[in-house]
Image (tube, grey):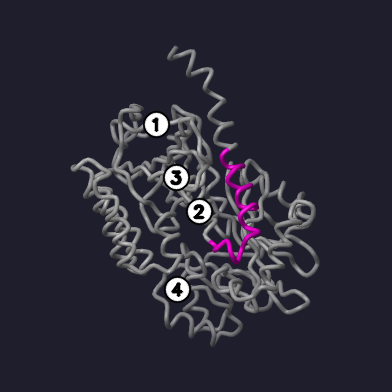
Amino acid sequence: MSFIDAKLPALSDAFVPPIVRGTADLTHFAYQGYDYEALMARIGELLGRNPPDAEEAAWTYDAAIVAQLGFRRAEGLNLQDAALAAAQVYRIEAGDGGPQSEQPPLRLLALVGPGDLMTNTPLDFLTNHLNVRLDLLYVLPGRGLPPVIPDHDVAFFAVGEADPATLTRLRRLYAAWPRPALNDPRFLPGLERDALSQCLVGIPGLCSPTAVTVSRAALDAHLATGRPIEGVDLPDGPYLIRPVGSHAGTGLSRIQTTADLSEYLRFSFERQFFLTAFEDYKSSDRLYRKSRVAFIDRQPFLCHMAISQHWMVHYLNASMTESAERRAEEAGAMASFEAGFARRHAAAFDALHERLDFDYYSIDCAETRDGRLLVFEADTAAIVHLMDPPELFPYKQPAMRKVFAAFDAMLRRRAELTRPLLRSVTG
């Protein structure tokens, strides 16, 4: 163990952290069209649920999420800093969509890090549909863990990306954690775009376009001299550029000429970028199809398939709500996934798992024109959700319930591994 974590926290069922709405609840509310003021009113409804000394921390924590949902990122991160200065552990209010049960909920503790809404595995999008109590323990740079934290059946290491010092700390905590733990953080470096493309080279039936990291200085030198970008050997043709650390298409552009690159850099203040070879995955009908596949204990589940006329496909910009034809195709893809897509790419999935041995992660992927699995990215922090309106997307209800049930089963299997030992120690 590192010096800062030389003593792990005591585990206590008597410890009750501040109760908050959390990311999933507030995101779902925003997804339904409610504005900033309505979201702030929603977090105000929790006033009175916490002891007086925890009210401000709980309100500030949720207000940080609301600010980010309202595109006030800097304000949101400042509010988050204030909340984490007051408390390092928060409890997500129990969701109302889970199955009714007379049994006590499974107790899940997630170790998370500070940052924006894409920093950690968004577990409450899953657990809000389950008989699971979710607590969030923040691992903060330069600060030890609290002396006491809630007891739990399973821990989940939910930090999606980490600097070297934080990664070392997380690995040591994972190895020493007193309860069963999921998602070993030692595999996190393999999720970086350049590392992922390198480790997937040469796998039959799989395409992961070459990706490299390049500095702003190297790009500027290339534009100034016309010489090739130092250390970059991309295939001929267009390539993609995006800032290192960006998500959800932020700052992503396709570059075909030096003029395109010059124009892109004119409007960017970033210092490090990923350059990725562009693979044209357009289908014969000239539409692009991109899928999100979640893996739970290595079992694949199709969570959505977006269909778009544009190469940069996101579910929210793919006109799925407006197109009954595209929804029908997605419904068919979900119904046939196990016998179709998953079977065709089973060997590629197995190769992925050998390199990314997480208990839970997802990929955004497609199929190349020659039928290979095209992997855009792998991630532990992608959102897997059931927010789409059921009247338009009725087929998603059974599909996503299978995902939630598989996640629940994984948690309970892992918890059961050590229960006989715990009973022998405590009984």
x and y, in percent, of residue 356 in the image: 61, 46
| Residue type highlighted by circle 2 | Ala
247, above or below 294, in the image? below
x and y, in percent, of residue 23 in the image: 41, 54
- Secondary structure of residue under mark 2: loop
Please give left or right for residue 89 compared with residue 318 in the image.
left
| Residue type highlighted by circle 4 | Ala
Res 389 quadrant in image: bottom right
- Residue drawn at the location 33% of the way across and 27% of the way down: 10
Query: Which residue is outermost to the bottom?
Result: 259
Mark 3 = which residue? 167
Mark 2 = which residue? 381
- Residue drawn at the location 70% of the way across and 58% of the way down: 334
Mark 4 = which residue? 217
Mark 1 = which residue? 1
Query: Which residue is outermost to the left?
Result: 52
- Residue drawn at the location 60% of the way across and 64% of the way down: 211
Q: Over which residues does the magenta segment extend?
A: 388-408
Q: Is residue 396 magenta?
A: yes
Local packing at callout 3 (Cα closer than 10 Å; few below 14, some 14-19, many 20+) is: some
| Foreground: disc 3 or disc 2 | 2
Please give left or right for residue 385 compared with residue 271 in the image.
right
| Residue type highlighted by circle 3 | Leu
